[in-house]
Image (spheres, helix red, strand yellow):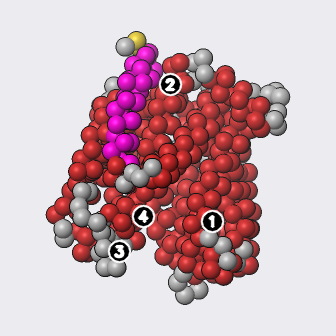
Amino acid sequence: MGKSQFSLFRSRKFLPLFITMFLGAFNDNFFKSAMVILITYRLADESGIDARIAVTSAAGVFILPFALFSAIAGQMADKYERSSLVRKVKILEIAVMGGAVAGFHSASVWLLLVVLFLMGAQSALFGPLKYSILPQHLETGELIGANALIETGTFLAILLGTIFGGVFVLGEWGLVTVSFLVVGIAVLGWAASLFIPPTRVVDPFLEFRFNIFGETWKLIKNVWPRRDIFLPIMAISWFYFVGTIFLSQFPLYAKTVMGADEMVATLFLAVFSVGVGAGSLACDGLLKGEISGKYVPWAALGIAASSVSLYFAGIRETAAEDALMSVGQFVLVPQNLAVLSCLLAISFFGGLYIVPLYAIIQSRSGEDELAGVTACCNVTDSVFMAMSSLAAAAMLRAGFTIPQIFLATAALTIAASFAIRAAVRDRTRKNGEVSEK
């Protein structure tokens, strides 16, 4: 048995990148949460705008840059040295967060949405760097453990950023506190990036092209023929489709189905994040360094089965919105513990599902194509997340209840599991050796 995945935290080849990633993901969600809460509870009324429209628009504003700029990000990752590029991207984050400070203190919803778009663009530039640096610095047998830690850290950062952003912004001196923190965290992220070791430049003579739509289409068209890579990318994007369904419905599910307050919705997010982290960390113990998708189709079926269980656990009388349960009251109801168990199972299987897929595309991609492959993955992820939001909206408009949306997602995941099996069955790789399955 190889070394524990946690030994990577003792390596300069991994720890600075992990800290940089964690602080970036935390800051994204800290800012988004603070902005959404501020708009919902203060700025919407003051500005005379519909809070529902502004908040719904915010989700699309953050996702859009991933579709627009991922192709450019892939080119940059191939043309320039990646660790220095990470540092430049983190400097950009500091500047963007300076704009966030201006947006908070001017109480401008539109400026905050512009900042959110720029934050999404900065994150889109960082994505291909994060995943393409790992195979350059680490051994093949370390990729499963590294990706597990990255996914665990990402969901933990999402959880903490979402909680603290909402808690701080409406408190006493809230805008000052949030303004200080978004800039300070960006500075800390840049400081951590200074310790990322340099990487090999993949293609210094690459001709840089700024045609956003043309290059995005070319990016997809180049990866499309690579069945062994494109199918796992589609499988990853399906994870984001399903995850977006659940995460976007948690507030309404807590209030209208469970009859609980907003802190129970946060509890759902916490349970979901813990589950993904636990499933991700379990991958390294199950696979023992082997880059293999043998558990991925079973994990997809586990997501589906747990979603069906969630549907039945959530059946109850219509919730009374005038007497919403607190977290303490919620957990004292045995049926509600079944709901939490189902959410934990869904997310655990989600972690078990996603980590091998990232390691598969990293191991199957050549060094000169990995950044482009990761950029393509970012594009398809953003498309699937947008499709997820549209699908959920369409089902709600058609009269579906939220538990029925979860049930429909389970049915779609069962259907998708056959394609997912094809995505991972081609090859496995263990300790650098490739074998056909």
Would you name the residue on which mark 1 appears? 54
Pick the residue in front: 411 or 108. 411
Looking at the image, residue 359 sits to the left or right of residue 372; the answer is left
Disc 3 crowd rating (10 Å Cα; few below 14, some 14-19, many 20+) is: some
Q: CA distance from mark 3 to mark 2?
A: 44 Å
Disc 4 crowd rating (10 Å Cα; few below 14, some 14-19, many 20+) is: many
The numbered mark at residue 251 is: 4
- CB contact under 8 Å: marks 3 and 2: no
Where is residue 423, by image quadrant? top left
Q: CA distance from mark 1 to mark 4?
A: 16 Å
Q: What kind of residue is marked 3?
A: Glu
Q: Quadrant of the C terminus?
A: top left
- Of tags 2 and 4, the one toward the viewer is 4
* Image location (x, y in percent) of residue 320: 30, 73
N-terminal of the pair, mark 3 or mark 2, is 2
Q: What kind of residue is marked 2?
A: Leu
Q: Is residue 293 located in the magenta-colored stretch of the structure?
A: no
Above or below residue 212? Residue 65 is below
Q: Is residue 94 visible?
A: no
What stretch of residues is rendered in magenta? 405-434
- CB contact under 8 Å: marks 2 and 4: no
| Residue at (69% x, 56% y) in the render | 117
Pick the residue in front: 264 or 273. 264
Number of on-image labels: 4
- Of tags 1 and 3, the one toward the viewer is 3
Q: CA distance from mark 1 to mark 2?
A: 35 Å
Would you name the residue on which mark 2 appears? 231
Q: Is residue 415 located in the magenta-colored stretch of the structure?
A: yes
* Image location (x, y in percent) of residue 418: 37, 24
- CB contact under 8 Å: marks 3 and 4: no
* Image location (x, y in percent) of residue 244: 47, 49
Would you name the residue on which mark 3 appears? 321
